[in-house]
Amino acid sequence: VHGVVGGHVQDSNGSDAGRLWDVLVDDDGRPRAAVIDYGGALGIGRRKVAVSWQVLHVAPEDPTHPIHLSLTRQQLGAIPEFKYGSGPTTLGNGR
């Protein structure tokens, strides 16, 4: 996970989809979801969404675009905003 947090995320069309803000892990320490800082312009209107870890494709051998997402920006926009400690979370999973 180290080196992935803070990385740029590309959507399924190759467009900038924000930055990977955080990784949510289960009790065994396995990644289950990623929190992506998404949207807005010039820092205004940005929000965080949680997506299933399964829709991320991390390619550490490509230092320019190491994180690819199998969701579009439109799909990200439809995911409810993620808030820490707010109870059950809806994860974007591309379905």
Image (cartoon, rainbow, N blue to C red):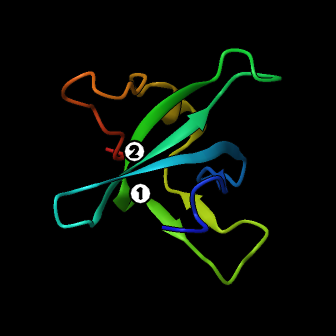
Please tell me which residue lies in front, 72 or 51: 51
Please tell me which residue lies in front, 57 or 44: 44
Q: Are marks 2 and 1 in contact (CB under 8 Å)?
A: yes
Relative to 66, is 44 above or below?
above
Q: CA distance from mark 2 to mark 1?
A: 7 Å
Q: Quadrant of the C terminus?
A: top left
Pick out the residue farthest to the right.
Answer: 42
**What's the residue type where badge 2 is placed?**
Val
**Mark 2, residue position:** 51
Say which element carries label 1.
Answer: helix
Q: Residues within 10 Å of mark 1 (few under 14, many from 20)?
A: some
Q: Residue at x 47, y 60 (%)?
A: 56
Task: Locate residue 30 relative to residue 43 in the image: left or right.
Answer: left
Please tell me which residue lies in front, 44 or 17: 44
Residue 47 in percent (x, y) is at 56, 24
Residue 73 in percent (x, y) is at 59, 36
Q: Residue at x 39, y 44 (%)?
A: 51
Q: Residue at x 61, y 33 (%)?
A: 38
**In which quarter of the view is residue 81 placed?**
top left
**Mark 1, residue position:** 55
Residue 10 in percent (x, y) is at 66, 53
Q: Which numbered dot is residue 3?
A: none
